[in-house]
Amino acid sequence: MLKKPIFITNFKTYEQATGVNAVELAKVHEKVATKTGKSIGIVVTSTDLYRVSQAVNIPVFAQHVDPIDYGSFTGHVLPQNVKNAGAIGTLLNHSERRLDLEILENTIACAQKSSLVRIVCAEDPDEVAAFTAFDPDFLAFEPPELIGSRDKSVSSESPDSIRDSVNRAKGIPVLVGAGINSAEDIRVAMELGARGFLVASGVVKADDPEKALTELVMAM
Ligand code: G3P
């Protein structure tokens, strides 16, 4: 069971967060988790899962898996392999890796079969409500137009949608993301019912990721 609120950094495929840099950045996250006592996870590329999981003792997630089992599926991401590589869960349906509804449903089921924690991304409160039917472990609300923004965030631009998402999530914990850069962004979303955060550039692209991460998690 993951402790909430949880702060999750999505490493995406940023240069600062892949390969050996992924290991270094993961260690920064582990250090901040230990120092602050906050619940912190990371989402890394499938090619970095094993080495990152070996290097740190914080929850590591995959960025995606495919709806397959062992067999003839060249080039696919096998959920059980992700699990065996050290991931405790997977992100699914991120705005940068959207899935058709039927594929999403099958993928969630396959991830569950491999006992992976399932974080399903939704672009608006309607999707949050619709995806509750798949019974994910977390719903992550991220308006795509605010992803990567350095001066606008879901908290500053769309607080009503955060409240709406929380109200329509049927008790499934909602993570909030897109443009989260400041302690104020965190505080606003927490007051509206967020149970955690999904952040990328605010940490990965910060001049001092350790400082940025510490400031953000301390506001939770
Ligand atoms: O998955 C997190 C992400 O899409 C948010 O990105 O850069 O706006 O924090 P960012």
Image (cartoon, grey):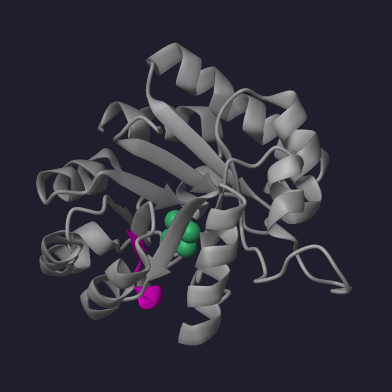
Q: Is residue 48 left or right of residue 209?
A: right
| Vertical relation: 53 (above or below) 142 | above
Q: In this view, does 143 lie above or below 53?
A: below
Give x and y (percent) for residue 208.
Answer: 54, 33
Stretch of the chain drawn in magenta: 140-145
User: Along the line of sight, which residue is nearer the eye, 133 or 212?
Assistant: 133
Q: Image quadrant for the N terminus?
A: top left
**Nearer to me, 141 or 116:** 116
> Residue reaching furthest top?
35
Q: Position of residue 153 (x, y in %)?
A: 29, 61
Query: Who's the residue at 27% across and 63% down the image?
Result: 154
How many marks the image carries: the answer is 0
93 or 130, which lies in front?
130
**Would residue 100 be visible to someone looking at this image?**
no
Residue drawn at x 65%, y 63% as measured from the top left: 65
Q: Is residue 144 magenta?
A: yes
Observer-nearest residue: 177 or 76? 76
Locate the C terminus by quadrant.
top left
Residue 116 lies, in percent from the top left, at 56, 48
Q: Is residue 127 visible?
A: yes
Q: In this view, does 174 lie to the left or right of 50?
A: left
Q: Is residue 134 above or below residue 212?
A: below
Residue at (28, 77) in percent of width and height: 130
Residue ID at (43%, 63%): 120
Quarter of the figure with residue 79: bottom right
Examine the structure image and report whether residue 57 is included in the region drawn in magenta. Answer: no
